Amino acid sequence: MNQTIRFTLNGKPVSVTTDPERMLLWVLRTDLGLTGAKFGCGEGFCGACTVAVDGRAVRSCQTPLRTIEGKKVLTIEGLEKDGRLHPLQEAFMKHDALQCGYCTPGVIMTAWSLLESKPKPTDKDIIDALEGNLCRCSSYNRIVRAVREAAGAVKGA
Ligand code: FES
Ligand code: FES
C-alpha cells in the first residue's frame, strides 16, 4: 500500500507518496529526477548509488524509502552552494580523478561523509572509507590525491 514519506532532500522538504518498500535510489532517479546517484550492481557492492543520510554514506540501492522518514538526504546535486562547487568537486576536476565518471558521485558522497566525521583524514582513512566504492576505470590514486587536497580546503573554509 502506498504511503507518504517526508524527508529533507538537499536542504528542501519533500514528500513522496509511493510504496515505502521501494529503494531510495529509484525514488531519487525516477520520481524526483535526480540522476546523480547511479545504478551499478543494485546489491550494495559497488557504491555507485551512494548518498548521505543524516551525514552518513549509505547505499541508496539498499535503502527502503520508509527508513528515511524525517531524515536529511544529501545527493551529489546538493553539494554546490550558491553556484560554487564543493572543494571535493573542485579537487576531483583538478586531479582528473575520474575517467568515465560513473563512480564519481558515489565516491564523492562517500568522501564527503568521511570529511564530516573526520576532517583531517590520513591516506589510510581515505583508502579505508572508499574501499567499497569501485572504480572500473581504476582512478584510485588520483581519487585519494583529490580527497586529500579537498580535506585541506574544507578545513580552511
Ligand atoms: S548500485 Fe548500490 S552498491 Fe552498487
Ligand atoms: S571513473 Fe569510470 S568508474 Fe570510476
Image (cartoon, grey):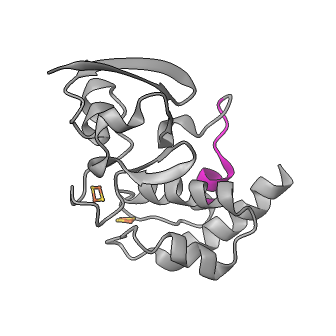
Viewer-side residue, 119 vs 4:
4
Residue 113 among those drawn in magenta: no
Residue 142 is at least partly visible in this image: no
Q: Please determine whether, in this image, residue 132 is positioned above or below residue 6.
A: below
- Tell me: 129 left or right of 105: right
Residue 146 is at least partly visible in this image: yes
Residue 43 placement: quadrant: bottom left
Q: Position of residue 117 (x, y in %)?
A: 67, 58
Q: Residue at x 53, y 77 (%)?
A: 128
Q: In this figure, what is the number of numbered marks?
A: 0
Q: Position of residue 82 (x, y in %)?
A: 68, 28
Q: Position of residue 68 (x, y in %)?
A: 41, 35
Q: Position of residue 126 (x, y in %)?
A: 59, 73
Q: Please determine whether, in this image, residue 5 is positioned above or below residue 56.
A: above
Q: Residue at x 33, y 25 (%)?
A: 32
Residue 156 placement: quadrant: bottom right
Q: Residue furthest right?
A: 156
Q: Residue at x 64, y 53 (%)?
A: 90
Q: Quadrant of ligand 2?
A: bottom left
- Tell me: 81 left or right of 96: right
Q: Which residues are magenta?
A: 83-91
Q: Residue furthest left?
A: 1
Image quarter where the N terminus lies is top left
Viewer-side residue, 73 vs 126:
73
Q: Please determine whether, in this image, residue 9 is positioned above or below residue 142.
A: above
Q: Residue at x 63, y 66 (%)?
A: 147
